[in-house]
């Protein structure tokens, strides 16, 4: 069993190579990640805390060893990753960026993840962290990709109709509905395709 520190946190690694718990402020919190995964998460936390309150989008590609492979910035609702694509930096790696308007991951974000076979994609804001992984056992065939996006648009249309009804009834605002639509869609898509998707409040 080995003991070491990352970012001031005491981590305990047992013989199976996994980190089983972390000590924060005297509290033992069990976790189940490898040392390389701990490095990735530490890197993501550092990067995301720098950009989550920015007014324009900033993005990073992070490798499986926690190394930053690419960074870029864009506009209030977009950051282009064409340069990272040209350099073949996406496959098997992680893309994280900020969403100034607080929305979940966009269809464009997930399309990049699938097309370039990324490990997972994240978006952060002042209030939330969002993370999505590709569908398990996804064969990336043209048929499977078409089925995925056909269902995406069907679900999105259904959720937009529901939110429009709430707006008309005065139960929500157009601004709140706009901020919530992507989250609702990915919650349903994650169940249909066995995808890992999560929205985590910054207060958790």
Image (cartoon, helix red, strand yellow):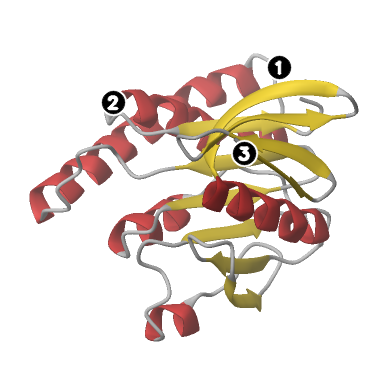
On the rendered image, what quadrant is the C terminus found in? top right
Residue at the spot of label 3: 178
Look at the image and tell me in which quarter the N terminus lies.
top right
From where the camera sits, is residue 160 visible? no
Q: Are marks 2 and 1 in contact (CB under 8 Å)?
A: no
Quick check: marks 3 and 1 in contact, CB under 8 Å?
no
Q: Position of residue 69 (x, y in %)?
A: 55, 76
Label 3 crowd bin: few (<14), some (14–19), many (20+), radius 10 Å: some
Image mark for residue 170: 1
Mark 2 vs mark 1, CA separation in Å: 31 Å
Which residue occupies the extreme right position in the image? 25
SS of the residue under disc 1: loop
Mark 3 → mark 1, Cα distance in angstroms: 15 Å
Image quadrant where residue 131 sits: top right
Between residue 182 and residue 50, name the one nearer to us. Answer: 50
Q: Is residue 116 visible?
A: yes
Q: Is residue 34 above or below residue 189?
A: below
Residue 192's label in the rendered image is 2
**Residue depicted at x 44% and y 62%:** 93
Residue in the foreground of this view, choosing between 128 and 137: 137
Label 2 or label 3, whichever comes before in sequence order: 3
N-terminal of the pair, mark 3 or mark 1, is 1
Q: Position of residue 138 (x, y in %)?
A: 20, 43
- Under circle 2, the secondary element is helix
**Which residue does the image show at 54% across and 19% down from the upper left?**
165
Label 2 and label 3: CA atoms lie apart by 23 Å
Q: Is residue 143 left or right of residue 27?
A: left
Q: Secondary structure at mark 3?
A: helix
Q: Please report whichever mark, 2 or 1, sits nearer to the chain's N-terminal start.
A: 1
Give the image location of residue 85, x and y in percent: 40, 78
């Amino acid at each position: 069993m080995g003991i070491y520190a990352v970012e001031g946190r005491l981590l305990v690694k047992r013989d199976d190579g996994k980190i089983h718990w972390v000590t924060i402020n005297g509290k033992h919190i069990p976790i189940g990640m490898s040392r390389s995964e701990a490095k990735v998460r530490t890197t993501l936390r550092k990067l995301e805390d720098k950009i989550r309150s920015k007014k324009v989008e900033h993005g990073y590609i992070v490798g499986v060893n926690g190394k930053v492979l690419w960074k870029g910035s864009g506009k209030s609702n977009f950051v282009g990753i064409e340069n990272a694509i040209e350099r073949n930096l996406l496959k098997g790696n992680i893309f994280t960026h900020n969403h100034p308007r607080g929305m979940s991951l966009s269809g464009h974000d997930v399309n990049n993840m699938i097309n370039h076979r990324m490990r997972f994609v994240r978006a952060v804001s002042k209030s939330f962290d969002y993370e999505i992984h590709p569908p398990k056992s996804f064969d990336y065939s043209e048929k499977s990709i078409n089925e995925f996006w056909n269902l995406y648009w069907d679900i999105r249309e259904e959720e937009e109709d529901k939110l429009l009804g709430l707006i008309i009834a005065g139960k929500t605002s157009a601004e709140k509905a706009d901020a919530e639509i992507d989250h609702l869609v990915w919650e349903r898509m994650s169940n249909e395709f066995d995808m890992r998707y999560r929205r985590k409040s910054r207060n958790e």
